[in-house]
Amino acid sequence: MAKKTLKRNQDGEKLRMYLSTLPLKDSSKMVVKLAEACKVPLHTVHNWRGGLCRIPELAKDKIEEVTGVKIFHSENLPPKSE
């Protein structure tokens, strides 16, 4: 269970680090955009950022699509077979 907690905190830290690189005004707007794009309430995005809950894999893909930046690395996922 410690591994899940560690992964959850790492993903939250990555999202938090990205949002901290934005100006405060843009960071707030980006959080709203992410909530709308992922179809979740605003407090859920705040929970993701704080590492309080896990960010689903589909939401990670959507976050990277909206931001245009590779935030999460998929080194723990098995390679895709074609």
Image: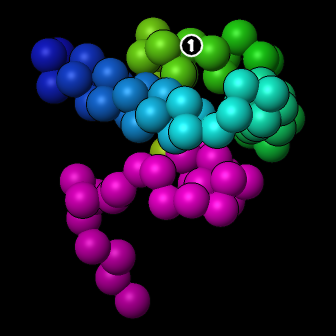
For mark 1, does the 10 Å Cα neighbourhood hold few (<14), some (14 to 19), or many (20 or more) residues? some
In percent of the image, x 53 and y 22: which residue is there?
Answer: 48
In percent of the image, x 16 and y 25: which residue is there?
Answer: 3
**Magenta stretch secondary structure, dominant:** loop
> What colouring style does the render use?
rainbow
- The location of residue 23, given as percent across then percent down, is 69, 34
Q: Is residue 73 left or right of residue 23?
A: left
Front residue of 60 and 24:
24
Badge count = 1
74 drawn magenta: yes
Q: Measured along the vertical axis of the image, is residue 53 above or below residue 67?
A: above
Q: Measured along the vertical axis of the image, is residue 65 above or below residue 63?
A: below
Identify the image quadrant of the N terminus: top left
Residue linked to disc 1: 47
Amino acid beneath label 1 = Asn
Q: Secondary structure at mark 1?
A: helix
Front residue of 8 and 82:
8
Identify the image quadrant of the C terminus: bottom left
In the image, which residues are magenta?
59-82
- The location of residue 40, given as percent across then percent down, is 76, 26
